[in-house]
Amino acid sequence: MSANGVVIVGAGSSARMGGADKLFALLAGQPLLLHSLDAAQRCEMVQQIVLVVATQRLEETRCLLAAQPMGKLRAIVPGGARRQDSVMAGLAALAGVEYVAIHDAARPLVTPALFGAGFAAVAATGAAIAAVPVVDTLKRAAPDGSVEATVSREGLWAVQTPQVFRYELLLAAHRGSEGDVTDDAMLLEALGQPVRIFPGSVRNVKVTTPDDLALAAALLARQTD
């Protein structure tokens, strides 16, 4: 049986959180980063987890998790200047995995089932990403804010994490990457590698601002009612 790994990336600057580090903001009484860690820990298809955090938060994170041990957590490593640098640091800390899921720690409402769905979907193409259909009306605007056109939303998806890949394929894509990317799937797309979408969840929100944190808390409260 092949081994699966998860890299949880949380090395960002939290620039829109009013000076607070969102990963340590409390959500249902626990630091936000613990929620995605717990989901990966509880997924039966996951054998290894690596957490990537900002260098200045490394010791604090290690102390936090020493008090809440997780058997699948292999390493806590410092991130880099760019997102792909942080992902590479996480990939390097895994050992002997065939598939790896990359997940943003800022999406705390991920579930074990969503990780499992990604690992189930990845075998077909070597790359599978969680996404939900775009439901809002889309407008293209000029720099001054004037509407130029309404854009059809047919076939458009809002991408989330986890994004799951064959480990060696993602590692090679990162090693050959140039410039900044906003998600790992972009690296595979640039190589002409097929990427498959699997259903994400509208509840799998990304916490970027204090309002997002309040929304996540409300969703989590409904989930546990």
Image (spheres, helix red, strand yellow):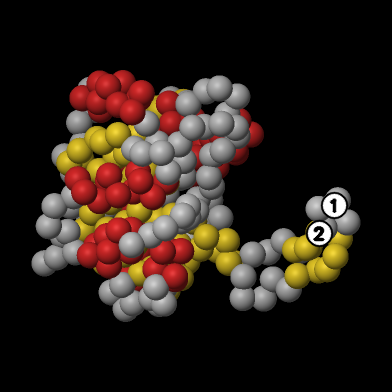
Q: Quadrant of residue 44?
A: bottom left
Residue 72 locus on image (x, y percent): 18, 43
Seen as rendered, the residue at the extreme right is: 146
Q: Is residue 9 visible?
A: yes
Q: Give the image quarter of residue 213.
A: top right
Quarter of the figure with the N terminus: bottom left
Residue 136 place in picture, x, y as percent: 72, 61
Q: Is residue 194 left or right of residue 124?
A: right
Residue depicted at x 26% and y 36%: 77
The image's mark for residue 145 is 1
Residue at image point 19% right, 45% down: 93
Percent of width and height locating residue 36: 37, 42
Q: Residues within 10 Å of mark 1 (few under 14, many from 20)?
A: few
Closer to the camera, 225 or 57?
57
Give the residue drawn at x 21%, y 49%.
Answer: 92
On screen, residue 170 above or below 9: below
Nearer to the camera, 150 or 55: 55
- The crowding category of the residue bearing disc 2, from other C-alpha atoms within 10 Å (few below 14, some 14 to 19, many at least 20), is few
Coordinates of residue 94 in the picture (x, y in percent): 18, 50
Find numbered disc 2 in the image and state the secondary structure of the residue it sits on: strand
Vertical side of 205 occupied by 10: above or below: above
Residue at mark 2 to residue at mark 1: CA–CA distance: 5 Å
Q: Which mark is residue 63?
A: none
Q: Name the residue: 54% across, 39% down.
A: 207
Q: Amino acid at mark 1?
A: Gly
Whether residues under marks 2 and 1 lie with C-beta atoms below 8 angstroms apart, the answer is: yes
From where the camera sits, is residue 28 visible? Answer: no
Q: Circle 1 — which element? A: loop
Q: Amino acid at mark 2?
A: Ala
Residue 141 is tagged as: 2
